[in-house]
Amino acid sequence: MRIAVISDVHGNIVALEAVLKDIARRGADVTVSLGDLAFKGPAPSECVGLVRGLGMPSVQGTRT
């Protein structure tokens, strides 16, 4: 099984889309988000919506 892990996207939808495209190209069986998906970024709701739409397992990051 091939597992891809993403983290610290920080609302960067352009980077998130590029990484997800690369993950798909490499044939990962599952992708997991380790948090910090939206905090302090330019497009937080778009990133959250994309990850939710994919049903990606995620860990919620914390604010410090």
Image (cartoon, rainbow, N blue to C red):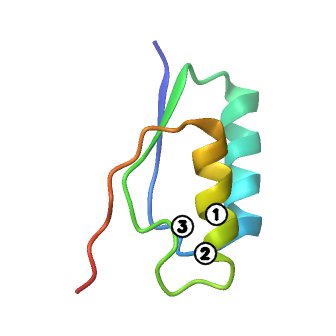
In 3D space, how far apart are the residues under numbered discs 1 and 2 (Cα atoms)?
A: 5 Å
Per the image, label 2 sits on a secondary structure element best described as helix
**Identity of the amino acid at label 1?**
Cys
| Front residue of 62 and 12 | 62
Crowd band around label 3 with a 10 angstrom C-alpha radius: few (<14), some (14–19), many (20+): many
Q: Is residue 54 left or right of residue 30?
A: right
| Element carrying mark 3 | loop
Q: What residue appears at the point 72 percent right and 31 percent down from the top-left corner?
A: 24
The picture places residue 16, in percent across and down from the top left corner, at 67, 59
Q: Please state, as top left, top right, bottom left or bottom right, where the C terminus lies in the image.
A: bottom left
Residue shown at the point (76%, 42%) measured from the top left: 21
- Sequence-wise, the earlier of marks 3 and 1 is 3
Give x and y (percent) for residue 32: 45, 39
Q: Which residue is mark 1?
A: 47
Residues at discs 1 and 2 in contact (Cβ within 8 Å): yes
Give the label, 3 or 1, closer to the camera. Answer: 1
Q: Nearer the viewer, residue 45 or 32?
A: 45
Disc 2 target residue: 44
